[in-house]
Image (tube, helix red, strand yellow):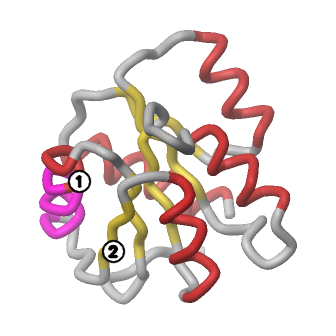
Amino acid sequence: MAFDAGTSILVVDDYQTMVRIIRNLLKQLGFENVDEASDGSEALAKMREKRYGLIISDWNMQPMTGYELLKQVRADRDLHSTPFIMVTAESKTENVIAAKRAGVNNYIVKPFNAQTLKAKIDAVAAST
C-alpha cells in the first residue's frame, strides 16, 4: 500500500507545538490531509467518524495514552488494520517491545526530521 498526498492522516499529541511540527513535516513530504487530536479518546472518536490512512500518535498523553489508543484501535473490528506509528521521547526497549506486541507498525523517537518521518512512513507503506 502506498501513501499519497490524498492520504488522510491523524496526528495525536497533547502538546500543540509537537502537532504543529509533525503537521509541517508532513506538509514538506506532500501530505495535505492532516487532522489532529489531543489525546487517545478524541482520536478514537475521530476515527469512528472518518477513515484515516495513517495514525501518528504520541505515547505520553492524558487521559488516554498513545499505547492505550493503539490497543483500542487493534481491538476494534473496523479500525484494527489502520497503520499506526508511535512517537515517543524515550527509546526504552520495553516500550518498543510493548508497542510491537500491541501491533504498532513503526516507532519514531523524538526529535526527528522530515527524512526520518518519510523513511518510517515508507516502511509502513511497504509492510501493509
- Residue ID at (38%, 63%): 37
* On screen, residue 126 above or below 60: below
Marker disc for residue 34: none
Dividing the picture into quarters, in which one does residue 33 lie?
bottom left
- Residue ID at (55%, 63%): 125
Classify the position of the C terminus by image quarter: bottom right
- Residue 63 in percent (x, y) is at 51, 42
- Residue ID at (46%, 15%): 91
Element class at badge 2: strand
Amino acid beneath label 1: Val
Amino acid beneath label 2: Asp
Q: Foreground residue, 47 or 96? A: 47
**Total label count?**
2
Residue 58 belongs to magenta span:
no
Q: Foreground residue, 81 or 123? A: 81
Q: Is residue 51 left or right of residue 32?
A: right
Marker disc for residue 35: 2
Q: Is residue 45 left or right of residue 71?
A: left
Q: In the image, which residues are magenta?
A: 20-28
- Residue 83 in percent (x, y) is at 61, 62
Residue highlighted by disc 1: 19
Element class at badge 1: helix
- Residue 106 in percent (x, y) is at 56, 42
Q: Foreground residue, 42 or 9? A: 42
Q: Is residue 64 left or right of residue 11?
A: right
